[in-house]
Amino acid sequence: TLAYLALAMLVVGGFIVLAAEIQGLRNQQRSDAAAAATLTASGALENSLLGLQTGARGYVITGQAAFLGPYRRALAVYPRQVRQLERLTMADPAAHRGAAAIGQAIDGYVRNWAAPVIRQAATSRPAARRMVATGAGRLRVDRIQGQFAALNRQQEALVAAQQRTADRTGAASLVLGLCCAVVSLVLIALFAFSVRKYVAHPVHQLAEGFIRLHRGELRSEEHTSELQSHH
Protein backbone atom coordinates (compact mmCIF):
# COMPACT_ATOMS: atom_id res chain seq x y z
CA THR A 1 0.00 0.00 0.00
CA LEU A 2 2.78 2.41 0.90
CA ALA A 3 4.56 1.59 -2.35
CA TYR A 4 1.39 2.32 -4.32
CA LEU A 5 0.94 5.61 -2.44
CA ALA A 6 4.56 6.66 -2.99
CA LEU A 7 4.39 5.78 -6.67
CA ALA A 8 1.15 7.74 -7.08
CA MET A 9 2.70 10.75 -5.33
CA LEU A 10 5.68 10.61 -7.67
CA VAL A 11 3.46 10.47 -10.73
CA VAL A 12 1.39 13.42 -9.52
CA GLY A 13 4.56 15.33 -8.66
CA GLY A 14 5.94 14.63 -12.11
CA PHE A 15 2.80 16.00 -13.74
CA ILE A 16 2.96 19.12 -11.54
CA VAL A 17 6.59 19.72 -12.53
CA LEU A 18 5.71 19.20 -16.20
CA ALA A 19 2.79 21.64 -15.97
CA ALA A 20 5.00 24.23 -14.26
CA GLU A 21 7.64 23.83 -16.96
CA ILE A 22 5.06 24.29 -19.74
CA GLN A 23 3.68 27.40 -18.03
CA GLY A 24 7.21 28.75 -17.65
CA LEU A 25 7.87 28.23 -21.34
CA ARG A 26 4.65 30.05 -22.22
CA ASN A 27 5.60 32.97 -19.99
CA GLN A 28 9.05 33.04 -21.58
CA GLN A 29 7.53 33.13 -25.06
CA ARG A 30 5.21 35.98 -24.09
CA SER A 31 8.08 37.94 -22.54
CA ASP A 32 10.27 37.37 -25.59
CA ALA A 33 7.47 38.50 -27.88
CA ALA A 34 6.86 41.63 -25.78
CA ALA A 35 10.57 42.51 -25.76
CA ALA A 36 10.83 41.93 -29.51
CA ALA A 37 7.82 44.19 -30.12
CA THR A 38 9.35 46.87 -27.89
CA LEU A 39 12.66 46.70 -29.74
CA THR A 40 10.87 46.93 -33.08
CA ALA A 41 8.84 49.94 -31.97
CA SER A 42 11.97 51.57 -30.57
CA GLY A 43 13.78 51.07 -33.88
CA ALA A 44 10.88 52.55 -35.86
CA LEU A 45 10.75 55.62 -33.61
CA GLU A 46 14.50 56.09 -33.83
CA ASN A 47 14.25 55.98 -37.64
CA SER A 48 11.64 58.74 -37.46
CA LEU A 49 14.03 60.81 -35.35
CA LEU A 50 16.71 60.38 -38.01
CA GLY A 51 14.14 61.36 -40.66
CA LEU A 52 13.46 64.58 -38.77
CA GLN A 53 17.17 65.31 -38.52
CA THR A 54 18.00 64.43 -42.14
CA GLY A 55 15.08 66.41 -43.55
CA ALA A 56 15.86 69.52 -41.55
CA ARG A 57 19.61 69.45 -42.29
CA GLY A 58 19.08 68.66 -45.97
CA TYR A 59 16.70 71.56 -46.41
CA VAL A 60 19.00 73.99 -44.60
CA ILE A 61 22.07 72.92 -46.56
CA THR A 62 20.53 72.69 -50.05
CA GLY A 63 17.45 74.84 -49.83
CA GLN A 64 15.54 72.16 -51.75
CA ALA A 65 11.99 71.59 -50.52
CA ALA A 66 12.23 67.89 -51.46
CA PHE A 67 14.22 67.35 -48.26
CA LEU A 68 11.20 68.40 -46.25
CA GLY A 69 9.37 65.23 -47.40
CA PRO A 70 11.12 62.88 -44.93
CA TYR A 71 10.82 65.53 -42.23
CA ARG A 72 7.08 65.93 -42.70
CA ARG A 73 6.48 62.18 -42.88
CA ALA A 74 8.43 61.62 -39.67
CA LEU A 75 6.65 64.55 -38.04
CA ALA A 76 3.29 62.95 -38.87
CA VAL A 77 4.05 59.44 -37.59
CA TYR A 78 6.35 59.85 -34.61
CA PRO A 79 3.66 60.83 -32.04
CA ARG A 80 1.79 57.61 -32.79
CA GLN A 81 5.04 55.65 -32.50
CA VAL A 82 5.73 57.21 -29.10
CA ARG A 83 2.28 56.15 -27.87
CA GLN A 84 2.87 52.63 -29.14
CA LEU A 85 6.23 52.40 -27.38
CA GLU A 86 4.70 53.68 -24.15
CA ARG A 87 1.89 51.11 -24.43
CA LEU A 88 4.31 48.24 -25.01
CA THR A 89 6.35 49.16 -21.92
CA MET A 90 3.40 49.60 -19.54
CA ALA A 91 4.28 46.41 -17.64
CA ASP A 92 7.85 47.61 -16.96
CA PRO A 93 7.92 50.91 -15.03
CA ALA A 94 11.59 51.64 -15.80
CA ALA A 95 11.16 50.98 -19.52
CA HIS A 96 7.93 52.97 -19.55
CA ARG A 97 9.69 55.96 -18.02
CA GLY A 98 12.44 55.61 -20.62
CA ALA A 99 9.89 55.53 -23.46
CA ALA A 100 8.10 58.61 -22.11
CA ALA A 101 11.42 60.44 -21.76
CA ILE A 102 12.30 59.63 -25.38
CA GLY A 103 8.97 61.01 -26.55
CA GLN A 104 9.48 64.21 -24.59
CA ALA A 105 13.02 64.57 -25.92
CA ILE A 106 11.85 64.24 -29.54
CA ASP A 107 9.10 66.78 -28.88
CA GLY A 108 11.74 69.14 -27.56
CA TYR A 109 14.00 68.54 -30.56
CA VAL A 110 11.19 69.36 -32.99
CA ARG A 111 9.84 72.35 -31.05
CA ASN A 112 13.14 73.94 -30.01
CA TRP A 113 15.46 73.01 -32.86
CA ALA A 114 14.21 71.40 -36.09
CA ALA A 115 11.15 73.60 -36.62
CA PRO A 116 12.97 76.87 -35.79
CA VAL A 117 15.88 75.97 -38.10
CA ILE A 118 13.48 75.23 -40.97
CA ARG A 119 11.65 78.51 -40.40
CA GLN A 120 14.98 80.34 -40.34
CA ALA A 121 16.10 78.67 -43.59
CA ALA A 122 12.94 79.87 -45.29
CA THR A 123 14.00 83.49 -44.67
CA SER A 124 17.79 83.28 -44.36
CA ARG A 125 19.68 80.14 -45.28
CA PRO A 126 23.06 81.53 -44.14
CA ALA A 127 21.65 82.19 -40.67
CA ALA A 128 20.14 78.68 -40.60
CA ARG A 129 23.46 77.18 -41.68
CA ARG A 130 25.21 78.97 -38.85
CA MET A 131 22.70 77.42 -36.45
CA VAL A 132 23.41 73.95 -37.86
CA ALA A 133 27.18 74.57 -37.74
CA THR A 134 27.06 74.99 -33.95
CA GLY A 135 26.32 71.27 -33.65
CA ALA A 136 23.55 71.86 -31.13
CA GLY A 137 21.04 69.89 -33.19
CA ARG A 138 23.40 66.98 -33.60
CA LEU A 139 24.08 66.98 -29.87
CA ARG A 140 20.36 66.74 -29.16
CA VAL A 141 20.01 63.79 -31.53
CA ASP A 142 23.02 62.06 -29.98
CA ARG A 143 21.50 62.36 -26.54
CA ILE A 144 18.18 60.95 -27.70
CA GLN A 145 19.96 58.07 -29.43
CA GLY A 146 21.69 57.38 -26.13
CA GLN A 147 18.25 57.08 -24.54
CA PHE A 148 17.23 54.64 -27.27
CA ALA A 149 20.39 52.59 -26.66
CA ALA A 150 19.69 52.45 -22.91
CA LEU A 151 16.11 51.29 -23.48
CA ASN A 152 17.22 48.65 -25.98
CA ARG A 153 19.95 47.37 -23.64
CA GLN A 154 17.40 47.11 -20.87
CA GLN A 155 15.07 45.03 -23.01
CA GLU A 156 17.89 42.79 -24.22
CA ALA A 157 19.11 42.30 -20.63
CA LEU A 158 15.57 41.42 -19.56
CA VAL A 159 15.31 38.77 -22.27
CA ALA A 160 18.73 37.37 -21.35
CA ALA A 161 17.81 37.21 -17.64
CA GLN A 162 14.53 35.46 -18.42
CA GLN A 163 16.37 33.00 -20.64
CA ARG A 164 18.83 32.19 -17.85
CA THR A 165 15.94 31.67 -15.44
CA ALA A 166 14.21 29.40 -17.94
CA ASP A 167 17.43 27.42 -18.44
CA ARG A 168 17.87 26.95 -14.68
CA THR A 169 14.25 25.94 -14.28
CA GLY A 170 14.55 23.48 -17.16
CA ALA A 171 17.71 21.95 -15.69
CA ALA A 172 16.10 21.62 -12.26
CA SER A 173 13.01 20.04 -13.81
CA LEU A 174 15.19 17.59 -15.72
CA VAL A 175 17.06 16.56 -12.56
CA LEU A 176 13.82 16.22 -10.62
CA GLY A 177 12.30 14.18 -13.42
CA LEU A 178 15.30 11.83 -13.49
CA CYS A 179 15.13 11.45 -9.71
CA CYS A 180 11.43 10.64 -9.92
CA ALA A 181 12.13 8.07 -12.62
CA VAL A 182 14.88 6.41 -10.57
CA VAL A 183 12.76 6.33 -7.41
CA SER A 184 9.81 4.99 -9.40
CA LEU A 185 11.96 2.15 -10.77
CA VAL A 186 13.19 1.35 -7.27
CA LEU A 187 9.64 1.29 -5.92
CA ILE A 188 8.49 -0.89 -8.79
CA ALA A 189 11.37 -3.28 -8.13
CA LEU A 190 10.53 -3.38 -4.41
CA PHE A 191 6.89 -3.97 -5.22
CA ALA A 192 7.79 -6.80 -7.57
CA PHE A 193 10.04 -8.33 -4.90
CA SER A 194 7.25 -8.03 -2.33
CA VAL A 195 4.77 -9.69 -4.66
CA ARG A 196 7.22 -12.48 -5.34
CA LYS A 197 8.04 -12.96 -1.67
CA TYR A 198 4.65 -12.56 -0.04
CA VAL A 199 2.29 -13.65 -2.81
CA ALA A 200 3.94 -15.67 -5.55
CA HIS A 201 6.15 -17.79 -3.29
CA PRO A 202 3.36 -18.81 -0.84
CA VAL A 203 1.06 -19.55 -3.78
CA HIS A 204 3.78 -21.65 -5.36
CA GLN A 205 4.31 -23.53 -2.10
CA LEU A 206 0.57 -24.07 -1.75
CA ALA A 207 0.39 -25.40 -5.30
CA GLU A 208 3.27 -27.78 -4.63
CA GLY A 209 1.45 -28.96 -1.51
CA PHE A 210 -1.68 -29.71 -3.49
CA ILE A 211 0.41 -31.56 -6.06
CA ARG A 212 2.11 -33.64 -3.37
CA LEU A 213 -1.21 -34.34 -1.73
CA HIS A 214 -2.70 -35.36 -5.02
CA ARG A 215 0.26 -37.65 -5.71
CA GLY A 216 -0.11 -39.15 -2.25
CA GLU A 217 -3.78 -39.90 -2.86
CA LEU A 218 -2.90 -41.51 -6.18
CA ARG A 219 -0.28 -43.72 -4.53
CA SER A 220 -2.79 -44.66 -1.83
CA GLU A 221 -5.35 -45.62 -4.42
CA GLU A 222 -2.78 -47.66 -6.33
CA HIS A 223 -1.77 -49.45 -3.11
CA THR A 224 -5.38 -50.19 -2.30
CA SER A 225 -5.92 -51.57 -5.79
CA GLU A 226 -2.90 -53.85 -5.43
CA LEU A 227 -4.16 -55.23 -2.12
CA GLN A 228 -7.56 -55.91 -3.58
CA SER A 229 -6.03 -57.70 -6.52
CA HIS A 230 -4.04 -60.00 -4.19
CA HIS A 231 -7.22 -61.01 -2.41
Image (cartoon, helix red, strand yellow):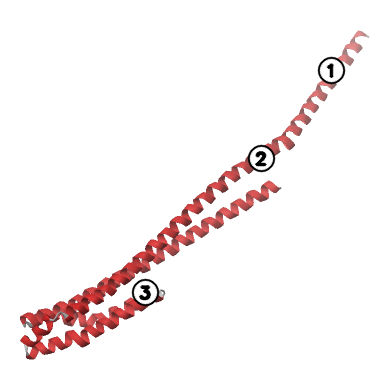
In the depicted structure, whether residue 53 falls above or below residue 119: above
In the depicted structure, whether residue 229 falls above or below residue 109: above
Residue pictured at 48% horizontal, 62% vertical: 23
Question: In the rendered image, which residue does mark 2 sit on?
Answer: 190
Disc 1 or disc 3, which is closer to the eye?
3
Question: In the rendered image, which residue does mark 1 sit on?
Answer: 219
Whether residues under marks 1 and 3 lie with C-beta atoms below 8 angstroms apart, the answer is no
Residue pictured at 67% horizontal, 48% vertical: 4
Q: Quadrant of residue 53?
A: bottom left
Pick whichever of labels 1 and 3 is earlier in the sequence. Answer: 3
The three-letter amino acid code for the residue at tag 3 is Ala
Q: Secondary structure at mark 2?
A: helix
Separation of marks 2 and 1 at Cα, in angstroms: 42 Å
Q: Name the residue at the top extreme.
A: 230
Measuring from the top left, give residue 171's x and y in whole percent.
47, 52
Q: Secondary structure at mark 1?
A: helix
Give the side of residue 159 with respect to residue 169, left or right. left
Separation of marks 3 and 2 at Cα, in angstroms: 56 Å
Residue pictured at 21% horizontal, 82% vertical: 75
The three-letter amino acid code for the residue at tag 1 is Arg
Measuring from the top left, give residue 9's x and y in whole percent.
63, 53
Query: 221 and 48: which one is in front?
Result: 48
Measuring from the top left, give residue 145's x and y in whole percent.
24, 74
Residue 95 - label: 3
The three-letter amino acid code for the residue at tag 2 is Leu
Give the side of residue 184 with respect to residue 115, left or right. right
Q: Quadrant of residue 113?
A: bottom left
Pick whichever of labels 3 and 2 is earlier in the sequence. Answer: 3
